[in-house]
Amino acid sequence: MSAAPRPPASDASSPTSQGPPTVLVIGAGLIGSYLAAHLSHRPDLCTTHIVARPRVVEAIKKVGSLSATSQAAPTTPVSIPVASLSLHDSLEAYRSSPAGANPPTYIIVTVKRGAAGSVYDDLKEMGTAWSATSAVVPFMNGVGAAEQARDALPQWTIMEGMWPFNVIESSEQHYSQASGGDVYVDETEKGIALAKLLTQAGIATKTSPNMEGILYGKLLINLHNAISALTGLPIQQELATRAARKIWAGCITEALDIYRANGINPVSFLPYGIPYTVLPTILALPNFLFFPIATKMLSIDPRATSSMYEDLRHKRTTEIDYIQGQVVRLGKENGLHAPICERIVALVKEEERKAEGVGHLTADNILDALELI
């Protein structure tokens, strides 16, 4: 594998006149590793540090490098030898190292929602120098991740972030972009600087003053995650299965009704700005009609799976409470029921309890059960 040559040095992405920013990436799963590889490949733009679990740090060291491939440059992966990576097995280990002498400019948190609280508890111990300097940016599933961070870290700058595309580990410690989309962050001074930095590092990023709409739009897309996990189908196969698409369509319809009751206006990421209101109709089409108009949706890497699929595969607690569960909670606030989403939550939690890996339900069986509601 030949690594892409590093571009010439540039200070254009620096948010201050004091030189390139420091980025601390907390969490080295699929998203965190992909992000950290791209940032570490550009030391001219920023100084990057990675905090990951000890077993992950050891795995990177064993392979000897961290690599990533984007869809924009599929033949020129970035690859960083371990000697050029700044790896730490805990936040305290980072702070105690020479690298931790100064607070990072950005702290990008890519852990699971259930683990975020412990990360924020650790950040509280970093002191006022960090809280006065560092901006915390959660890239997590669902909505409310930034609100959780603000509640835990009231003195800190917190920015909303939205990660749109799937990442797969195509080989050991090599992470590949498996679908499309632009990353989004808050349209603030620091957000604009971060978007520029990420874009220059090879991760197309935009800013928005309406991150609530962005995140609720992404939530509608993420409603398919549970279907992939319950059926054990990779995403491309899931999308090619009409019964699976009809389940997703039912979840979206419930969510949109509840959004309207809550005054939520999701921002569309669909091609040509197609509104989400027509997506359930498109998804329910027979395959011979759906396939020709959904070529972009179906162009996802056939190896790509949902994060919930991976959670069940590894017998971890899923984030269903932050996806279909969020729709159910919003409905209850307005006295509305979301029976399809409620049933999907129950099915996923049953798979969690069994701890047998990904589900083996057929989409037709799930659909038959849902039609009885």
Image (cartoon, grey):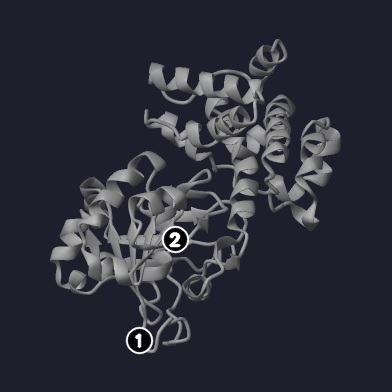
Q: Is residue 284 visible?
A: yes
Residue at image position (67%, 40%) is 262
Amino acid carrying label 2: it is: Ala
Q: Nearer the viewer, mark 2 or mark 1?
A: 1
Q: Which mark is residue 84?
A: none
How many dots with numbers? 2
Nearest the viewer among 310 and 92 is 92
Residue at image position (68%, 39%) is 259
Amino acid carrying label 1: it is: Gly
Residue 270 position in % (x across, y down): 73, 51
Nearest the viewer among 72 and 367 is 367
Mark 1 crowd level (few <14, some 14–19, many ≥20, 10 Å Cα): some
- Measured along the vertical axis of the image, is residue 173 above or below residue 22? above
Quarter of the figure with the C terminus: top right
Q: Which residue is mark 2?
A: 68
Mark earlier in primary sequence (2, 1): 1
Nearest the viewer among 136 and 39 is 136
Helix, strand or loop at label 1? It is loop
